[in-house]
Image: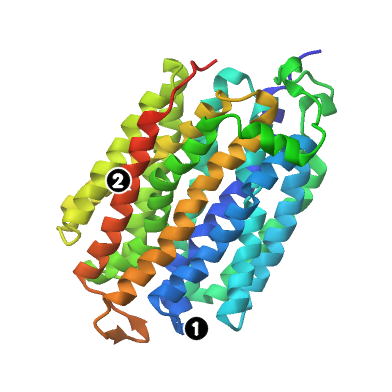
Amino acid sequence: MRLPPLRLSALVWGLAAAFYLFGFFQRVTPASLAPDLMRDFALSAAGLGNLSAFYYYAYAAVQVPTGVLVDRFGPSRMFLGGALLAGAGSLVFAWADTALVAGLGRALIGAAHGVAWVSMLKLVTHWFAPSRFATLSGLSLAVGTLGAVLAGPPLRWLADAFGWRIVIGFSGLFALALAVAVKFVMRDDPAERGFASHMPKGDRGEPRASVGADLREILRYPTPWLLALVNSGVCGAFLAFTGLWGVPMLSQVHGISVAQAALVTSGMLVLFAAGAPAFGVWSDRLQRRKLPFAVGGSLLLAGFAVLTAAPAAPLVLLVPVLLAASFGAGSMVLSFGLAKESAPLRLQGTVTGVVNAGVMLGTLVQMPAIGLILDARWQGIAVGGVRQYDVSAFQAGLAFLLAWIAVAMLLLAAIRERRAA
């Protein structure tokens, strides 16, 4: 039996990547829509942070259960259910009349998108050669991050032209259309299309006696849990900044428009997207994960150290630093290869869920925490119903992120690596 043709593998992966792109778009929409959301729902900084974090609460909550379910029932069912739920959540968010209902919509989107990354890496294991895992992981993250770029200036321009509710509503219809394509095209394994699988037979395994048995077994492997904590700093802090607080900080500290600030954070996301496949290719060639990950994480740490020390530095100097830090943050994709190689392959979905939960754990704590820090230092100034914060307030929030990243890098240094296949 021959292996699947590349065009078929690419089509299956492409549907998964499209849903991941959609979810990333929804993840960071509050950054570009911050003034609209604060005005329409009468939100403070803490309130905006909590509204944005609803997505992350739900996303984090489903990570480990999703990993177990993907290992048991396959990724295509998870993608189908996720796309349907994401479409419904987007429509709820688009037409919410209160912050609570908007938060519910965000939570539905977060729970739906929570299945995407774990399921996509499971598909990659079945549809592509093992030697391409880190490269495909990086490419997947890059495609997904393009969704965040679309949630920058393009979303702001569309929201100004048609209203943010219309734009978010149409994005929900896109998710529902994607669910139809998943239903008719996506399959868990090439064998379902009459081709040989890239997944080694001996590693497929049979479902264990219970979900609890899977969870108890994964506790035997410390590396995924440590990597979850590493990602809470390396990726969580990056997303807290680009996904919410970077736009208000840049616009208020530097006196630029929201659209211009969104352009900067979108540039950061583009470099993050470029860094992921670049570090993935380097890792596959080196057959190591930890060294490239440490290099990228160090770039992020250095960049946020500069940002924290001098948030009001001229943008011509600050933006290149932020872009270099963002490129380094893309190395977080290597955490999934590092985790995959630390436990049996049949537990890949569960392992991936544990590691990915760390990203959300960091962001869901950091977003509202920075909002609380900002509100505690608010000087009582508001423009058009939107609170304004000074440099020292933002600097305090950035110091919180910097400390988290530093701890994450210390944890990465403590991890022992097995040689990549």
Quarter assignment of residue 313? bottom left
Q: Nearer the viewer, residue 332 or 262?
A: 332
Quarter assignment of residue 339? top right
Q: Kindly identify which residue carries mark 2.
A: 323
* Residue for point 39% across, 74% down: 45
Q: Is residue 92 left or right of residue 403?
A: right
Question: Going from the N terminus, do you reach mark 2 or mark 1 first?
Answer: 1
Above or below, 240 against 157 in this view is: above
The dot on residue 64 is none
Q: How is the image coloured?
A: rainbow
- In the rendered image, the residue lying farthest to the top is 1
Give the amino acid at mark 2: Leu
Above or below, 142 against 341 in this view is: below
Q: Is residue 286 left or right of residue 17?
A: left
Q: Is residue 364 left or right of residue 13?
A: left
Q: Kindly identify which residue carries mark 1.
A: 40
* Residue for point 39% across, 65% down: 369
The quadrant of the image that shows the N terminus is: top right
Q: Cα distance, mark 2 to mark 1?
A: 32 Å
* Badge 1: residue crowd in 10 Å (few <14, some 14–19, many ≥20): few
Residue 217 spot, x, y in % from top left = 67, 31
* Residue for point 67% across, 55% down: 112
Q: Is residue 342 left or right of residue 374?
A: right
* Badge 2: residue crowd in 10 Å (few <14, some 14–19, many ≥20): many
- Quick check: can you spot residue 127? no
Quarter assignment of residue 221? top right
Badge 2 vs badge 1, beta-carbon distance below 8 Å: no
The quadrant of the image that shows the C terminus is: top right
Residue 57 spot, x, y in % from top left = 56, 60
